[in-house]
Image (spheres, grey):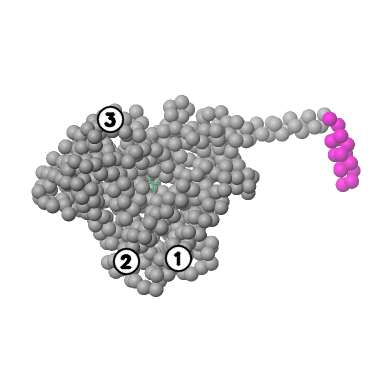
Amino acid sequence: MVTVAKIAMEWLQDPLSWVFLGTLALVVLQLRRRGKAPLPPGPKPLPIVGNMAMMDQLTHRGLAALAERYGGLLHLRLGRLHAFAVSTPEYAREVLQAQDGAFSNRPATIAIAYLTYDRADMAFAHYGPFWRQMRKLCVMKLFSRRRAETWVAVRDECAALVRAVASGGGGGGEAVNLGELIFNLTKNVTFRAAFGTRDGEDQEEFIAILQEFSKLFGAFNVGDFLPWLSWMDLQGINRRLRAARSALDRFIDKIIDEHVRRGKNPDDADADMVDDMLAFFVEATPGKATGAAAADGGDDLHNTLRLTRDNIKAIIMDVMFGGTETVASAIEWAMAEMMHSPDDLRRLQQELADVVGLDRNVNESDLDKLPFLKCVIKETLRLHPPIPLLLHETAADCVVGGYSVPRGSRVMVNVWAIGRHRASWKDADAFRPSRFTPEGEAAGLDFKGGCFEFLPFGSGRRSCPGTALGLYALELAVAQLAHGFNWSLPDGMKPSELDMGDVFGLTAPRATRLYAVPTPRLNCPLY
Ligand code: HEM
């Protein structure tokens, strides 16, 4: 043994042995690489930081421009992280259908992990038994059509929107801030669905918390990409995260305590989502939410699911973020597009006059008799998908289209670019709802997740569980606004002059709020 060690030591003292070892290491590396598929094309990364100088281009528009240059699957290196942008229907099918098992995790930044109580919600939980149970809870209970109170909230708040427009327009001639009124509608619906009817002061406190969450979700944090810098908290983000989560704790703990005290039966017609979730509630140590709620994947929720306070808080935030801005931005875009394209507004109003008549406003039972309304909604969601980039993460090493996508990569499916993909859509950038009519070229296309050129609600396992609720609010609000009023733009503005720019955040809403002048159109009073 001693002799072997002695020989090795002597051999290492010879400089030629180091040359030999270096060459051997290179050959092994080359052989390992040769077996692997290459990474897809993309802008050349710098050492250590990679493509981080391009962070401002990681929007739906920026990535679509990069895709023109590098193709439908492109690669970026963001510090330690591999990121991929998917911009064609073919690659989207590969990621969301053919290999969806490997692509169904969610990426979470430091801020998201902290603000969701370490992924104690559904939207950011990794794919697995815990997520499956949460999904069941949402689909079967919280967002279900059987939760009557939520659907009643949509109906009441749409009626309140119509009243606010009618009184705000001063009986004709004055512009209303339609964007703001629409945002109030969806905010009120989600707030009421989650917590029941509460006073306005509570709502304002909650909105301030949501706004800080939203800013923190979107804030660039260098620690996400260069983790060895995160302990320094150079941007003061960790301090803001702690303050934001404490504010939410104070707000929702009070509400949970009230709900526990009143002990409402979740089957009551006026039960809210907190009542529903309390049926699965167990007090647990704060911060241990995810483990406590993890279940064994059985079918019976009541036997398998346990929710802690942190789970309840995190799911409420999913509802707030998933259901407020998404629906509001779609309603506002639908109205803006129709004011930009008045012939389509007239066609919809004619359909409403024929089917509903001018003596009452639209109600839920009319919606399925309004085919052109459905086309307007589809065309709006094609051009302005409220969530323009679907964020997924790989759970395993994958190969897509001959390219390598390593485990733990961030994958951004650019639904906005796919909805405007020139090879899939004629006049891709034009608002033309008639393309979805039975005579139109897109007649058979729907957004249920099987048509990969049209994915406003995503596709596969992580697709939107709130689709039915979102669509109901969207269709009812657009129908009531189009039926209840004639619309013109303020200060003699021509339709072609309307600003149609968007901004990128959690959703892609209009860059400027939509102002418009309503003139009542029905033979009955609106309030
Ligand atoms: C027009 C309305 C809406 C649109 C366009 C929309 C769109 C989407 C999209 C594109 C996704 C991600 C799919 C993916 O990553 O592959 C999603 C997920 C989600 N949505 Fe919606 N959504 C809408 C309304 C709602 C509503 C009303 C709620 C709840 C009340 C909701 C709750 C959620 C949740 C919790 C997720 C995460 C699901 C998961 O990760 O498993 N959404 N939505």
Question: In the shown orientation, is residue 120 left or right of residue 487?
Answer: right
Contact, mark 1 vs mark 3 (Cβ under 8 Å): no
Using the image, determine if residue 489 lies above or below residue 239.
above
C-alpha separation, residue under disc 3 versus residue under disc 2: 46 Å
Q: Amino acid at mark 1?
A: Asp
Task: Classify 10 Å Cα crowding around label 1: few (below 14), some (14-19), many (20 and above).
Answer: some
Residue 193 in which image quadrant = bottom left
Q: Amino acid at mark 2?
A: Ala
Residue at mark 2:
271
- 7 in the magenta segment: yes
Q: Is residue 454 visible?
A: no
Contact, mark 2 vs mark 1 (Cβ under 8 Å): no
The answer to which of marks 3 and 2 sits earlier in the sequence is 2
Q: Amino acid at mark 3?
A: Glu
From the image, state whether disc 1 or disc 3 is nearer to you: 3
Question: Residue placed at 35% from the left, 58% from the top?
Answer: 191
Using the image, determine if residue 112 lies above or below residue 424.
below
Q: Nearer the viewer, residue 486 or 61?
A: 486
Q: Nearer the viewer, residue 5 or 120?
A: 120
Residue at mark 3:
497
Q: Which mark is residue 253?
A: 1
Q: Which residue range is magenta in the image?
A: 1-15
The answer to which of marks 1 and 3 sits earlier in the sequence is 1
Question: In the shown orientation, is residue 331 left or right of residue 259?
Answer: left
Q: Is residue 159 visible?
A: yes
C-alpha separation, residue under disc 2 versus residue under disc 1: 18 Å
Question: Residue placed at 13% from the left, 44% from the top?
Answer: 521
